Image (cartoon, rainbow, N blue to C red):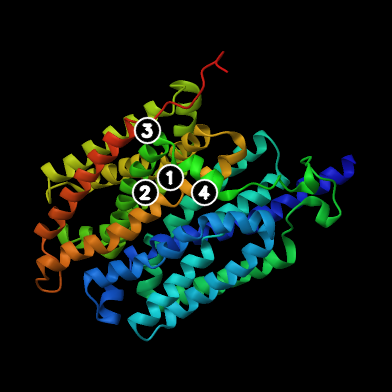
Amino acid sequence: MIKGLEKVYGYRWYIFAILAAQYLIVYFQRVAPAVVAQELIDDFQISGASLGLLASAYFYPYALTQIPVGILSDSWGPKKTLIVCGFFASFGAIFFGLAPRFEFAFAARAFVGLGVSAVFVATMRIFAEWYRGIELARISGILMAIGGVGWLTATTPLAVLSQAFGWRASFVVTGIVSLVFTIMTWRIVEDRPDKKGLPPLVEHTHNGMPAKRIILSDLKVILREKHFWAIAVWFIMRGGALFGFFGLWAGPYLMDVYRLSKNATGNILSMIAFAMIFLSPIIGHLSDKTLMSRKKVLVGTSILNCICWLVMLLFYGSLSIPALYVLFFLMGVTISSVGTIAIITTKELFPAEISGTSMGTMNIFPFIGGIIFQPLMGYILDSAGKTQGMYPPSAYRTMIWLLFITSIIALASIMRSKETLKQPGER
């Protein structure tokens, strides 16, 4: 048995590497349009609003399939779900790079969103079979950090690659790499150790499957919880800022307002990824051990986020390059890194038997923010019109005002949330 467990411990790292690589691609695909925004506008001859619509095509299927993907992973199997969705994501990326017109690019981007929507849920379902107890928490943290690396590759590295080979080649290569890892999933990954003839790490009832539940009844319980909606509104505002601004329009903002080069823009945008990579574990420790509170962390970072947007308004267009680095890093902390605390808070609002459904349901709302704010910000810019091929600074200032207002809404909403971390001695 010990020898068999050693094989499990060794083999699961192959599984982790394959699935983590796919999660890296998820984040790359999510924010890549920000760095190549101008090339997309020029190639497809589209407006800013249309670019926002194109970028948000990723989020529609992603948001809509979070709950179905969870059900498929439990009933059909996470490996099969990953493989089928992986082919959608791979060919979607390739077709996006080859798209002759806007309509084809929109459809391809939607296929990418549909494909990558399964990666996080199915991966966590597989990890729950190959890692146990405290291992699962640790491996999940590493996975989130690798997602940050994916965001990082969509900044300066993508800027350099697109300048050297063009944006189309960059996406075609991404699709081919994704296809390779999908095939590796088919050949190497298994749902559970026993499917490789190895001893199980996790004991199960019902042959490894959870007891059947009535999904609609669980959803009613979740959606009737008022504290759920306090977090949901917070997530919509955060998703709007993260995906709408930092995932798309922050690049043009830095280039048009501060006249920065593409490489310099990519370097500043990379601060969001660095915050995600290095600060997510620290924020988790702050919540669990130092402050021993979920709500204090969420409220505190929300206040800091409001201050950041206010600074960007008060010193609009006159911030130094180092100041932009600092602000974007703090934005990464207060918008991206803290998101895991909000998801954990959601989990702790409900009984364990519906915690997975509650987290999957909550995971829809950040993407609703992306769907709303990406085209809305494009509309704001288009309303101002272009001057010498660039949007005027005044248009971006209107956008920053919108983000400042939404940060206040997020703060007001999260202040109405419930403290879910039980103190020592509480039952």
Dot 1 alpha-carbon crowd within 10 angstroms: few under 14, some 14 to 19, many 20 or more = many
Quadrant in the picture for the N terminus = top right
The mark nearer the N terminus, 4 or 2, is 2
Residue on which the image places disc 1 = 276
Whether residues under marks 1 and 3 lie with C-beta atoms below 8 angstroms apart, the answer is no
Residue on which the image places disc 3 = 298
Front residue of 130/376: it is 376
Dot 2 alpha-carbon crowd within 10 angstroms: few under 14, some 14 to 19, many 20 or more = many
Q: Position of residue 252 (x, y in %)?
A: 23, 63
Q: Position of residue 197 (x, y in %)?
A: 86, 54
Q: Position of residue 378 (x, y in %)?
A: 22, 65
Q: Is residue 166 visible from the viewing direction of this image?
A: no
Residue on which the image places disc 4 = 360
**Residue 272: which numbered mark, if any?**
2
Q: Under tag 4, what secondary structure?
A: helix
Give the mark toward the camera: 4 or 2: 4
Which kind of residue does numbered mark 2 sit on?
Answer: Ile
The mark nearer the N terminus, 4 or 3, is 3
Gap in angstroms between the C-alphas marked 1 and 3? 15 Å
Q: Quadrant of residue 105?
A: bottom left
Which kind of residue does numbered mark 1 sit on?
Answer: Met
Instruction: Give the residue displayed 33% in from the left and 53% down from the top.
Output: 369
Could you tell whether 175 is left or right of 309 in the image?
right
Could you tell whether 229 is left or right of 203 in the image?
left
Give the mark toward the camera: 1 or 3: 3
Which kind of residue does numbered mark 3 sit on?
Answer: Leu
Instruction: Give the residue displayed 62% in from the left and 53% down from the top.
Output: 123
Q: Residue 343, relative to residue 288: is it above or below?
A: below
Q: Position of residue 219 (x, y in %)?
A: 51, 46
Whether residues under marks 1 and 4 lie with C-beta atoms below 8 angstroms apart, the answer is no
